[in-house]
Image (spheres, grey):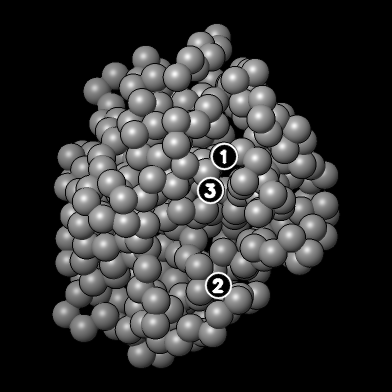
Amino acid sequence: MNLPALPADRAEAREALQRVVYGPVPEPVSVPGRDRASGVVDGLGVWRIVELALPGGRILDCLVCLPDRPSDDSVWFCGLNFDGNQSICRLEGVPENRSWSDREVGLGGLPWAFSVETILAAGHALVTCHVSDVCPDRPDLAAPVLAATAPGLGAVGMWAWGLASMALSLAPPGRAVLVGPSRLGKAALCAGALFDGWLGVAPIQSGTGGASPWRKGEGETLAQITSAFPHWFAPSLSAWAGRESEMPLDQHWALASVEAPGLLALGAEEDRWADPDGQARLIEAARPWAPAGALWESRTRPGRHEVTEADWQPILSWADRLQG
């Protein structure tokens, strides 16, 4: 795989990533929240629903889970979820927030991506909201939201803006780790690449358009992803289909643009569609820009495309080493 050299600096990389891949991503904002509901996580902590009113009329209903004894060193994991706050936990009283979704998922019906009890037991916090609170994941519904925000913007960039705004609004400065699986891992990496102030970034099996390369050894191609999901990226990205070797950048520019001391890209051996081997190569290609003393790693576990305790244990171990 012949990758283009890294540019002169992060500013150049970030401009190119928006021009070629994500579209013009707005600067995230910090806004005050409004508490709407609360409850307890038995023996582990408390939860709150906090409403954030973002520019453009986007209303985020955020689930905030805090450990019983948070410390100044606690990590705040911030990420979007697929099917509503109620889907990722079994916490009685958590209101449903489906926004737009293909699926009707009830309390604890799909605890994919986050392990609330594991995070709280480790003394850390979780902040999450439904991805469609930021932008619906369907081309026809996403189009007016994206056009009203910034012409040429893709949904991954829009999700990154919402995620970053949620983290800035609700997590203590410098304590947020941006995390997410699959397409939401693409958004976490985008937010970590374009904006500063995070403790870490942890995309999980983020694949093409995330932590794996456009210049494919295997897995999903640029043509396949832009055909199946035309709203995810800048509309002009599809013009590079079949010409990936001519692209002026690859996704190691996004990884290298992460200013945070922590970067953990996770993959799975059977998830060849997400190209875990290519992801590992990109981490090494980005490493020259790692901050001094940074914990930048790529890990691949046995298994397939899903998030399990086998992912959260290394994430928590890595997060513990970031504390200080």
**Residue 69 seen in the figure:** no
State whether residue 264 is above or below residue 288. Answer: below
Mark 1: amino acid: Thr
The residue located at (35%, 61%) in the rendering is 306
Check disc 3 and report the residue beneath it: 187
Among the two numbered marks 2 and 1 on one chain, the one whose residue lies closer to the N terminus: 2
Check disc 1 and report the residue beneath it: 221
Quadrant in which the N terminus is drawn: top left
Contact, CB < 8 Å: mark 3 with mark 2? Answer: no
Mark 3: amino acid: Ala
**Residue 49 seen in the figure:** yes
Residue 37 lies, in percent from the top left, at 46, 83
Check disc 2 and report the residue beneath it: 61
The residue located at (41%, 40%) in the rendering is 275
Mark 2: amino acid: Asp
Quote the CA–CA distance across marks 3 and 1: 18 Å
